[in-house]
Amino acid sequence: MKKTRKKYDAKFKAQVAIEALKERETLNELAAKYELSPVMISRWKSEFLANASAAFDAPKKDDEAFEKEKNRYLSKIGDLEMQLDFAKRVSKKLGIPLPADD
């Protein structure tokens, strides 16, 4: 039976790395507490420290792209709402019944 590797999310890794940085418990104690390897905890701690400056960086292009896409979708929703309102007014004038809104 083949074992698959456990995958840990970024929040969990950060939590463990912060606890390691506090040095209230040894790496071996933390490893036993979280059922991890002390080497893994050391690696996460190093990665955490290496990437700590990212918390203070300006928004990345990904954030800008997300905002641009969000604005495009909001604009599209506005256009579709205007078209729907127009269709409702015209169909009412022409006496064409529309399906009820759900």
Image (spheres, rainbow, N blue to C red):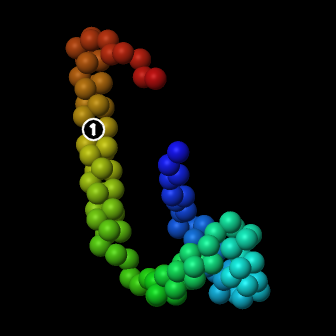
Residue 55 in percent (x, y) is at 48, 82
Residue 4 in percent (x, y) is at 50, 53
Residue 74 in percent (x, y) is at 33, 50
Residue at mark 1? 80
Q: Residue at x 32, y 12 (%)?
A: 97
Pick the front one: 58 or 101: 58
Q: Is residue 59 above or below residue 86?
A: below
Question: 10 Å neighbourhood of mark 1: few (<14), some, or many (≥20)?
Answer: few
Q: Is residue 29 above or below residue 3?
A: below
Q: Residue at x 36, y 15 (%)?
A: 99
Pick the front one: 95 or 46: 46
Residue 81, located in which quarter of the rendered image? top left
Instruction: Tell me if residue 56 can be seen.
Output: no
Side (left or right) of 66 relative to 57 = left
Side (left or right) of 12 relative to 99 = right
Residue 14, located in which quarter of the rendered image? bottom right
What residue type is disc 1 on? Leu
Side (left or right) of 43 relative to 58 = right
